[in-house]
Image: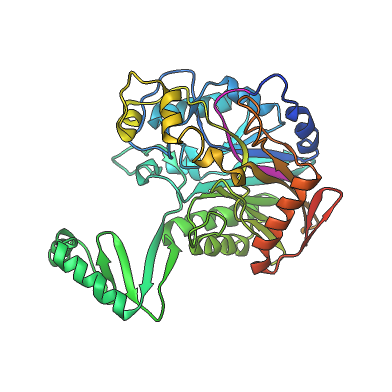
Amino acid sequence: MRICITGDSIMLTPPETSYTGYHELRKFIEQSDVRGTNLEMVISDGNPFASTYCGGIWLKAPSARLDDLSKYGFEYYGFANNHTMDYSYDGLRDTLKELEKRGFHTSGAGLGLEEANRPAVMSKNGERVAIISCTASCDDAARAGYASPTVSARPGVNMLRHSEEFMVTPEHLKVIDEIASATCLNARFLKAVRMGIHRLPHEIHRLGRLQFVEGFEDRKNSQCNKMDLERILKNIRESVKNHDYAIVCIHSHDIKGETDDTPDYYLEEFAHKCIDAGATAVIGTGTHQLKAIELYKGRPIFYSLGNFIFADEELLAAPYDYYERYGYEVSQSLKEIKMSCTKNGTVGLEYDFMNFQSIIPMISVLDQKVEICCYPIELNFNENKGIKGFPNLAGEKVGKEIFNRLKGLSSVYGTRMEIQDGKIVVY
């Protein structure tokens, strides 16, 4: 069984006719039995209303972009990420309808948590692969919910909630308590504690919504929500029992430090427990940059694949909230606002070359033995609009740059890799 699931795909407009990457990459991707990507935009030919929140900006594309994506050979689309609910329930329904109309497999979002939590199942050569998709990065209002005996299920995403806690030295903890006292920042919460609505463990100090504990150094800790974690692990165990392989896709923007290339602590916890539960691989997306590859008990964890397609410069539509957020009049063009926000195309995600280098993983499984190789890709960072953001297999020079970066990031996990004939072999 060969499995190939790529990073984030955002395609608001089609590439120019001179772009040839479709043919080159489809030939490679179709060597796999299971082929998928993370769909990080709403697909709708209608005019659904926008949510008050979004995944950064409100991303919506016509159904023709889904047809363009299928030219790469994808049959599976993960749809659990921070943009899934940009256009609320109608946008979710439209996207699911367009995926179903084309016969594509999907998981990660649905008209209730039971549906959002359900894996996509794909069959090939008598073997079946279950793909579970979830996101740890989205607004809580995007979270799908179960039905109760008296209330309908809530549409949304399969969410892995998590909590953060900051350990600080006694000196810093004293300052935090002083700030909280002087500003009355915790007043309403403390009133709720006195009324029995909330509980505050003795060792926890609060500053608004942030939680602190005393320690010997200053650092952040994070951990998975126990209920969400157990629900997903149960899903993995059932998938392994009923199918041949289980793949877990997780979308996370959280990081340990100040750079986008280090996975957060809870993500490491989650990935390890997924493998412990029987997952064949954990495939991460989220931050637009590559993160490390870890081999845990012989199974691969890709903490983030970065982008597969990053063509979001030409925003086609935006709600009133977009203009309000950036302080512009609705009479101004979206292109004009974009140029102003990015300082004429000099700052922002679309102007950082690190977001335009990635990999395509190929996971081969035979008799429960897993082999991994990755193909470096570049997303035409230096090309003009119409080609920029669309992938090609990387040339020798860029391929080595990607290899060296990935090798350095992965070394903290003891992962070994080498480059052979342009592909990265992980062992």
Residue 65 drawn at (x, y percent):
59, 24
Q: Residue at x 25, y 76 (%)?
A: 174
Q: Does the rendering let one see residue 187?
A: yes
- Reply above or below: 338 against 251: above
Q: Is residue 110 magenta?
A: no
- What residue range appears in magenta? 1-14
289 or 331, which is in the foreground?
331
Q: Main secondary structure of the magenta part?
A: strand
Tell me if residue 5 is in the magenta stretch.
Answer: yes
Q: Is residue 106 left or right of residue 161?
A: right
Q: Is residue 296 visible?
A: no
The spot of residue 90 in percent (x, y) is: 40, 26
| Picture quadrant of residue 282 | bottom right
Q: Quadrant of residue 190?
A: bottom left
Q: Residue at x 70, y 40 (%)?
A: 378
User: How far from the left and from the top, in percent, is residue 340?
Assistant: 42, 31
Q: Nearer the viewer, residue 312 or 69?
A: 312
Q: Quadrant of the C terminus?
A: bottom right
